[in-house]
Image (cartoon, rainbow, N blue to C red):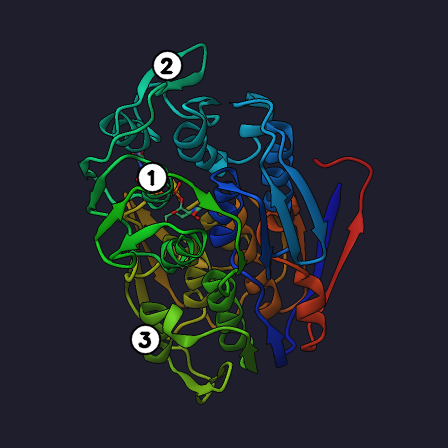
Amino acid sequence: MDRILIRGGTPLNGSIQISGAKNAALPLLAAGLLCEGQYNLSNVPQLADITSMVDLLTQHGCIISVDGNNIGINSDNITNTTAPYDLVRRMRASILVLGPLIARFGVARVSLPGGCAIGTRPVDVHIKGLQKLGAQIELSEGYINASAPNGLVGATISMPMVSVTATENLLMAATLAKGETVLINAAREPEIIDLANCLKGMGAIIEGAGTDRIIIQGVEKLNGTSHSVIADRIETATYAIGAIITQGELTLTHTDLSLIPTVSEALARAGAIIKETPNGFSIKANSGIITGVDVITEPYPGFATDIQAQMMALMTLCTGASMITETIFENRFMHVPELARMGANITVHGSSALVRGVSQLSGAEVMATDLRASVSLVLAGLAAKGDTVLSRVYHLDRGYEKLEQKLTQCGAHIERYKVAAEA
Ligand code: UD1
């Protein structure tokens, strides 16, 4: 088991290369099940979640080669259309193989992701959408059993809520359905545009990705292509906050300010000075004062729930107060008691957290509870006085490529070490 020690109080200064987006790479990997011939992805981040998806595709029979940030997939000899519980429970995004499998092979058996109530949330939108496309679906023994022996048929699907992976699953499934599919109330995240662009490279006919109405004309088959994964906007925003919370200055490269419209606007209101550069942007704190700003998480282009915890870490040091409201996930304030251990003043009322700024955080022993919560504790630790020790760091390894290396090269004192057993 690993832990991370952070010696706080040093501003981050320098340049960080942003990795490819995990949340784009996962559906792009699943899309490998849709196409014939060789399919090559580049700029894939090296992360535990990517390994989980590669393992899942491999057990379906895909031939996969991994070479650094490049992954090649060939799915011409699929041997197994079951996604077993052991692999799916490692990562909820494993559900992304459901749409491609049923669309291309007419049959899929995918374990329900762990921790969700069978038959209702959180995959009801995926299931109802596939049923609209003609799939027969039954839930039994913790599995989604789907079949469409004569293939899927295009339909108009109005989704009751905006769901990123449901939009991706239905988009992928519809590419091989007969006729036209219209996805209404589709998610608009940049990762969906990236997926649609790649599917188009395979020969799919898609219009409207990036809007809430996506129209797909089904085709007989898709062919392998080459595609480079877009920049990770969550990693981008995380390091942007790192520059401000440590009163430093960072240049973030291989990314794009337009990926984080609402977050960059909130950071500017908090006092950041942001300047676009040819392949990214620079960001620095203005005058040492962080102004409190209120934030509400929303589907894209609103403020991403995946940046809520990091923003809260920043707001713990603001002048005045900030109200942070979470509307996407219940119970996504698990970082609050940990930040409080570092001296933060936060009161939670239902889905809102009132953060009263303090003048300084102090290092403490804290525990990572999920991916984004854990990186918020790293940010807080970088800004705090003294040492912070973070346990359960495997959460970080799911989503942040070379985290310690990227931070160390910008002056942070951060190191990973092993302990015999995790408390
Ligand atoms: C994706 C992202 C995740 C991000 C989230 C919200 C990936 C791999 N993961 O997750 O990092 O936090 O979007 O931006 O891209 N819901 C249902 N039924 C469904 C589907 C969703 O009730 O069938 C609910 C969820 O419980 C949640 C909301 O809809 O309250 C949005 O979730 P969704 O957009 O589906 O999240 P993911 O796609 O799983």
Identify the amino acid type marked 3. Answer: Glu
For mark 1, give the secondary structure: helix
Quadrant of the image occupied by residue 155: top left
- Position of the N terminus by quadrant: top right
List the single residue furthest toward the top: 141
Which residue is depicted at the point 61% across and 68% down?
Answer: 382
Q: Earlier in the sequence, mark 1 or mark 2?
A: 2
Looking at the image, can residue 298 be seen?
Answer: no
Residue 378 locus on image (x, y percent): 59, 60
Question: Where does label 2 land, which residue?
Answer: 139
Which residue is depicted at the point 56% across and 76% down?
Answer: 246
User: Are circles 1 and 2 on residues that touch, CB within 8 Å?
Assistant: no
Gap in angstroms between the C-alphas marked 3 and 2:
44 Å
Question: Where does label 1 land, which residue?
Answer: 166
Question: Where does label 3 land, which residue?
Answer: 265
Q: Residues within 10 Å of mark 2 (few under 14, many from 20)?
A: some
Single out the mark in the foreground, 3 or 2: 2
Residue 198 locus on image (x, y percent): 44, 55
Q: In the displayed structure, does residue 217 sit left or right of residue 145?
A: left
